[in-house]
Amino acid sequence: GLFLLVLGHWWSQWDFRGLDWTYPSFFYVTLGPTLLFFAVALLIPVRAGEGPGDMRVYFLSVRPLFMTVMLAYSFVTWFDGPILQGQPILGPLGIIHIVFTGGLLVGLSSANARVQNIVALAMAGLVFAVMAVRFFPGAFG
């Protein structure tokens, strides 16, 4: 899911190709990939002995920070279109961002492995939904 999110994010930057770039707009647009980089980096254990067998324990230890970074990412990317291109905040992508943010809040509030698995699957589904709405215009209404 995260890999597709990274790909989808970079693909979505094409929407800004006609933007009259300023340093603040460039800085704002780079916040998303920076947050994604940090989120992915959090998922990579850096100490010896934290291999695949310990990944569940490791994830639970970084989960609060990971979910917080992903929440920041969600807000930054939710408002990039409205801020930079005047898109509606509560259009189809905005509604998906609300659900995405809700899922991240659930993931942040629960350390239960089953809940985390459900959140991960739901987030992957939402990434597909965002890609479908954003990259296949007209197909969904």
Image (tube, rainbow, N blue to C red):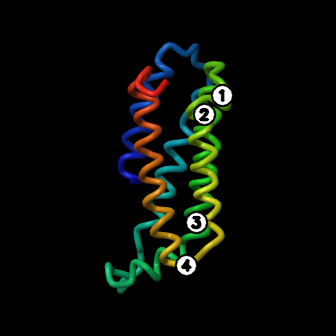
For label 2, count other residues whose C-alpha is less than 10 Å away and answer few (under 14), some (14-19) or many (20+): few
**Label 4 vs label 3: CA separation?**
9 Å
Q: Amino acid at mark 3?
A: Gly
Q: Is residue 52 above or below residue 19?
A: below
Element type at marker 1?
A: helix
Q: Amino acid at mark 2?
A: Phe
Q: Nearer the viewer, mark 4 or mark 1?
A: 4
Q: Earlier in the sequence, mark 4 or mark 3?
A: 3
Element type at marker 3?
A: helix
Q: Amino acid at mark 1?
A: Pro
Which disc, if any, is residue 112?
Answer: 4
Q: Which residue is mark 1?
A: 24
Residue at horizontal 64 percent and vertical 60 percent from the top: 105
Callouts 2 and 1 close, C-beta under 8 Å: yes
Residue at horizontal 40 percent and vertical 34 percent from the top: 132
Q: Amino acid at mark 4?
A: Asn
Element type at marker 4?
A: loop
> Residue 103's spot in the image, x, y percent?
58, 57
